[in-house]
Amino acid sequence: MNIGLLINNTEVPAHSGGTFERRGPLGGTSTHAAAAGVEDAISAADAAQTALAGWSAQGPNYRRSLLLAAADAMERRAQAFTDAMANETGASAGWAGFNVHLAAAILREAAALTTMVRGETIPSDRPGCHAMTVRRPAGVVLGIAPWNAPVILGIRAVATPLACGNTVVLKASEMCPATHRLIGDVFINAGFPPGVVNVLTNAPQDAGVVVEALIRHPAVRRINFTGSTRVGRIIAGLAAQELKPCLLELGGKAPMIVLDDADLDAAVAAAGFGAFMNSGQICMSTERIIVHGEVFDAFVEKLRSRVGALEAGDPREGRCPLGSVIDASAALRMRDLVDDAVSRGAVALGSFGKDETLLSALALVGVTPDMKIYAEESFGPVTTVIRAADDEEALRIANDTEYGLTSAVFSQNISRAFAIADRINAGMVHINGATVHDEAQMPFGGTKASGYGRFGGEAGIAEFTELKWVTIDTRTPHWPI
């Protein structure tokens, strides 16, 4: 498959003529994509700037109609997205289908937001002065999306900005250029005007210079990034130099607390889904299961059965619940984390198997702070089970991490669960639900090293607009001088 850059609704080669190859973890079909450089980054931002005046001047119902059309266009291309994700990232058909479903919902939620970009009237102390606030589009928005949930996160990077009247540049992941380029086709199919949505692909070695050129471009007024905390710090630093607001959704080490009165079957089911969906390659994945000592052994036995049923296989054959991890280096890192933990006394439930990137589910029981996996984000099909003596120790362990994205608490006593949920240092807490939970209308984001700002719903409007104070004097004020 050969793909170009999308600038001004036109597929163009890179200015240099360069391309790069993305070959997925299971071989087979390769993507040959245009390798954007600084000139292409500038061209994309220029195109978005040129389109901004016309797009921002359109009424909300016009923008709504196109966003709804994009949602329909996305669902019509579900199979193309499924094939691209399987080839480029090794994702299962179930995960790809969920990506398309939620991405379409995000577009429809963004369509609903177009008439909610509003201000308010505020009483003034000055007689005859009427004061109000209005929200205006920020300008060109740069969205940088990752490979692990490429359709959901690619659409999330641009949908609310578009609803608010901004134009966008989507920088595709080097790991899934064809998948992200398909998003651009969706907007063209929906009838978006030229320059409103632009998509850049780049070779891995050029990512730094392309992103820096985009952040430093005068027209770019907002940046949003979803990815690792390490890269997020770099992007936040560049944005700070330019005094440009940045929305970051970064790494996670999500805890799930299981109290002694929990429904263990429900907790195990949520743990299985939360830890192993998409082979654990989700920022919300359940990486630490903290279980009250009184039910620890019973929980572990139930989890053992669940883990043993979650085998990995080639997603293009559709025989197994888990697909591939992203590449061989990720698989090696998973094996190193497990070997380190086992060498220090942890007990493994299940086995990765011997395939290079097809790793079946595995859980480590008895993980302690001296093991690397206790603190490091694993981002793979492995979770940890840790014993806690009581509620206070469970809470301490849950908060013993630099991350703060999402979390869960299981208990049949909702008051008790809510008291613990209130003290977990995370942007999201789910009582009797999985740590992996996303809905288009919800404010999604984290704290600490998991980033800042919120995607989704009305919270997203504040991220991608400027709030302006406007006054109208109906009497001549008395000025003191």
Image (cartoon, rainbow, N blue to C red):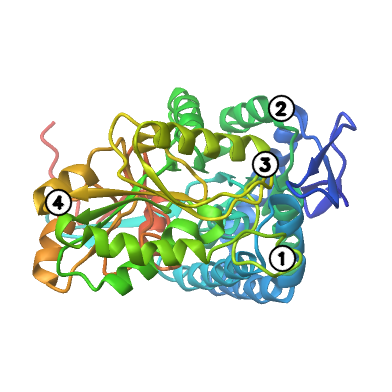
Q: Earlier in the sequence, mark 3 or mark 1?
A: 1
Q: Give how far apart the Cα atoms at labels 4 and 1 are.
A: 39 Å
Which type of secondary structure does the marked residue at label 2 adopt? Answer: helix
Q: Give how far apart the Cα atoms at labels 1 and 2 are.
A: 27 Å
Q: Give how far apart the Cα atoms at labels 3 and 4 are.
A: 37 Å
Q: Is residue 287 visible?
A: yes
Q: Nearer the viewer, mark 3 or mark 4?
A: 3
Residue 405 in the image, given as x and y percentages of width and height: 34, 48
Residue beneath disc 3: 327
Residue beneath disc 2: 206
**For mark 4, does the 10 Å Cα neighbourhood hold few (<14), some (14 to 19), or many (20 or more) residues?**
few
Residue beneath disc 4: 423
**For mark 3, does the 10 Å Cα neighbourhood hold few (<14), some (14 to 19), or many (20 or more) residues?**
some
Q: Earlier in the sequence, mark 4 or mark 1?
A: 1
Residue 312 in the image, given as x and y percentages of width and height: 62, 58
Left or right of 142 in this view: 3: right
> Which is more toward the observer, 332 or 156?
332
> Which is more toward the observer, 136 or 439?
439
Left or right of 135 in this view: 58: right
Left or right of 168 in this view: 468: left
